[in-house]
Amino acid sequence: MSTVTKKKTEERFSIGRTIRYVLLLLSVIFIFIPVYVLIVTSFKNGAEANPLHAWYLPESWVLDNWELAWKQLSAPILRTLQMVIPAALISSMLGSINGFVLSRWRFPYANLVFTLLLFGMFIPYQAVMVPLMKLVLGLNLPTGVPTLILIHVVYGIPITTLIFRNYYESVPNELIEAARVDGAGMLRTYWSVVLPISIPSFVVVIIWQFTSAWNDFLFALFFSTPVNGPVTLALNNLANGSILSNYGASMSGALLASLPTLIVYILLGKYFVGGLMSGSVKG
Amino acid sequence: MRRSAIIASAVALSLALVGCSSAGTSESKDAGKDVQVVSWWAQGSEKAGYEALQKIFKEKKKDFNFVDAAVAGGGGSQAKQKLQADLDAGNPPETFQAHAGAELTDYIKAGQIEDVSALYDKFKLREVFPQSLIERLTVDGKIYSIPSNIHRANVLWYNPEVLKSAGIDPKKVPATIDDWIADMEKVKAAGKVPLTLGMNWTQTQLLETILIADLGAEGYNGLWDGKTDWAGAEVTKALKHFQKIVELAQTDSSADWEPTLNFVMDGKAAYNVMGDWAIAAFTAAKKEMDKDWMWAPVPGTQDVFDFLADSFTLPKGAKNPEGAKAWLEVIGSADGQAQFNLIKGSIPARTDVDTTKFPEYQQKAMEDFKSKTVVSSLAHGAAAPLAVSSAINDAVVKFTQGQGKDVEGLQKDLVNATKSLKK
Amino acid sequence: MRNLKKWGPPFLLILPSLILIGVFVYGLIIVNFNTSLTDAHTAATSSGNAPTNYTGFSNYVELLSSDAFLFSLRNLLIFTLVFLCGTLLIGFVWAWLLDKPIKGEGIFRSIFLFPMAVSFVASGVVWKWLLSPIEGETATGLNRLFQMVGLDFLQNPWWSDVSVGIVAITIPAIWQLSGYIMALFLAGFRGIPDELREAARVDGASEWQLYKSIIFPQLSPVALSAIIIIGHMSLKSFDLIMSIANQSVYSTKVPAIDMYVFKTTYDYANSAAVGSILLVIVAVLVIPYLIHDTRQRRK
């Protein structure tokens, strides 16, 4: 008993452990430097909220910035949710189906098809924006949320397919073969065998798509207007107004616009790592 | 079975969200009445002035539905990117903001905007706009936009206390660039920042005022029609002045104009060269003219009004041209011009607006606009097309980031940047 | 016929994705390449108001022989290297620190992951302040902080330095993505069966030997996918540079910015050419990975 306690105390004070904590704390400071400035500035009044006073705590804490940011961003945040949730769900469904077919129900040239799909990740968006706009205009979708859902689903196909395919590759063959022997067709196999075990990858993909669609600015700029666009566009208007920038409000706006993704990460962070672990990283 | 229930509800939820979001976007639209207006007036006094215009529009043009499509950021560059893509893709807004003058030539050459001369007659604008302005707006006998406001770019703003602490009499404005440089050296010796500079266009704007001072109005105008040689000795002289000033300046090439002006307001720097929208910043900070800050034309440009104007256009193929015309009518109206400019801090393009309501600076600017030689600003799209001014911006930033060492390289880059003007 | 029955359904299932990618990616790449071979350099030609001519590869030749574009490519190379090394190193260290049982693991993990949740539009607002290039009495941002804590010698012009300024831009990028790389590595660590480690320890392997012969080989696929993800992000690093410096700052030019500037000034042909060059760079980076990946799977 006493030796166990002694060992434990030794461990607690061991040099290695101390170093680990010091490194972790330094990293936390690195992460929090920008966050500190964001938070304190968001509570400062107009005169105080300027770069020269960035490092000081507010002399008087005010909520005006948050009120203003909320006024300007609440409607766009709601629209962004309407865009991001369907986009993440649809593209993860598509990715799951593609990943299943490409890893488990291969047809001739499946590898080539996979490569072609994957390469779509790398298209330089800025250069193709005008033809892309013509293309989307031709579809006659209402601008704003519906168009952006389409765009995020389409350009999400490569990454979602990649993650699901890698995951399904790691699924033991026997599982699927068993279903086949039972005479189950492709859709049955997918529905009753593959889908139930896909939850970890769904978490990863949904988080990934949710974040990237939420944080996208380029497509938001070209495919929506401030009236029907997402929060990044509204935040840009708040933060980069060409005259008399209101720093306090832009910082509270930046925090406000990051909250939903932040909540997703805090709630699902554990499953995110777990999902990555269960196969998606074996790329 | 639980699994399929979850999935089914997820699908249902996403479909519902798609459904309600598309409903959300289509509900407010009575598409035929919408007037989508693209501008980069998204914050501050610009936004406040813009809102005054919207109010007039809503009162007077009840048939139409105003839709604000302002995009801020990058000195209007993001708004322009988006606009350009929309125009090219055949999806123009009803009207958009554009700098009057050479910057419009791109849209004209691309065949994207309509001649609005007929509207000038209809709204009786020819009588109320000064002749010199009409001339500047006319391309091959046609006019393509209606100006909303006029600004002066060659203004020097300074902090009298800082000058006094350096032993300079703030009332004695330097008459030439050389005198000004001498004063700035005194400021530097006193331990203060002589001049602050911000992002690309603020640097170009400083350069253009030095070019006006050294080349004179006529020589400066010649830079844009090929009569003045960019490779010439006069330009070299101006660039050397520019070099000296850049050496004295504190430069942050990412900062917008306002943070750089703050240094002057806070008594940390002496001078800043900025257009007269700077007034709005002083007013917002509750600083008083002649006490906290003073202004003068940039030394050597006393007799020149370096002009720029915002204006609105009529794009080809707009879905609601009648609505666009209604907006243009408000823009050109005496009421619209008076209210907008009073708030924005600029001066009306119309000459029949009651000047007495305007603050002291704006009254003086209106007087100067009538009496001084008017030249077109480079940094604000009046003097040269976008491709040229953008290339000049790049060359200037490259120069200032290189600590202003390479005057020869700068001149070479400028010659290259302006090649297309000679054709 | 039998083949069709066998391969038809799976093919039909991915057909929608194939069509979408075919149109939205490959269709556009072809249009883009086509534009890059023309002389659409002005407002009139780019908008289709005036006729354009094919000029072969002359846009590429001119771009690749211009100092300005070579400078952008150089910056891209530096940016990518520093960004990659930074995120891999920090991500690995974090994962290593959190792999062993430690109090508050969940909290640390959430903190490290958190920057990923923030868009560049949002974090750019504050990074622009922190990386302010002004030094001395009127300094702000990190330079100011250095003065306040007595580390004045650390003051520097950050991104504004012409030769190495691009490195400063990697700081926010590393801040943002190290957490993701940590998550990847952490998953990699956890994927190594404990028996393997134990077996090595029983065999008397030193800690270093354990890493060298067991852990690093197990992590290499993770590192590879991390390299691919970071690499492709760095090629597109655009929002970040735009929000901290801006499109006209010389010291931080990269091809993605050139593409934007050409586009703004109606030089669609050169914009398209830069886009194609970026695609080729990506292909050079990715195709070996894909081949390697396919071979691995065949085994």
Image: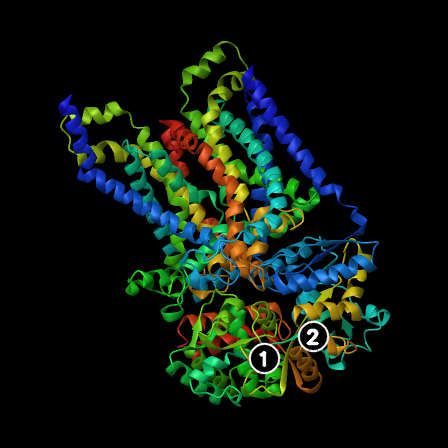
The 10 Å Cα crowd at callout 1, few under 14, some 14 to 19, many 20 or more, is many
The amino acid type, in three-letter code, at marker 1 is Asn
Q: Dividing the picture into quarters, in which one does residue B401 lie?
A: bottom left
Q: Which mark is residue B399?
A: none
Q: Coloured how?
A: rainbow
Q: Residue at x 67, y 62 (%)?
A: B48
Question: As rendered, which of C274 and B122 lies closer to the eye?
Answer: B122
Looking at the picture, does residue B167 appear above or below residue B30?
Answer: below
Question: As rendered, which of A108 and B57 lies closer to the eye?
Answer: B57
Q: Residue at x 63, y 42 (%)?
A: A79
Q: Is residue B183 visible?
A: yes
Residue furthest front in the image: A60
Task: Report the residue marked by disc 1.
Answer: B154
The amino acid type, in three-letter code, at marker 2 is Ile
On the image, the x and y values in percent for residue C299 come to 35, 27
Q: Is residue C288 visible?
A: no
On the image, the x and y values in percent for residue C175 come to 39, 48
Q: Quadrant of the C terminus of chain A?
A: top left
On the image, the x and y values in percent for residue B239 come to 48, 82
Q: Quadrant of the N terminus of chain A?
A: top left
Q: At numbered mark 2, what does the secondary structure look like: helix, strand or loop? A: loop
On the image, the x and y values in percent for residue B18 come to 66, 35
Task: Report the residue marked by disc 2.
Answer: B347
Name the front one of labels 2 and 1: 2
Q: Residue at x 20, y 24 (%)?
A: C199
Chain identity of mark 2: B
Chain identity of mark 1: B
Q: Residue at x 41, y 37 (%)?
A: C290
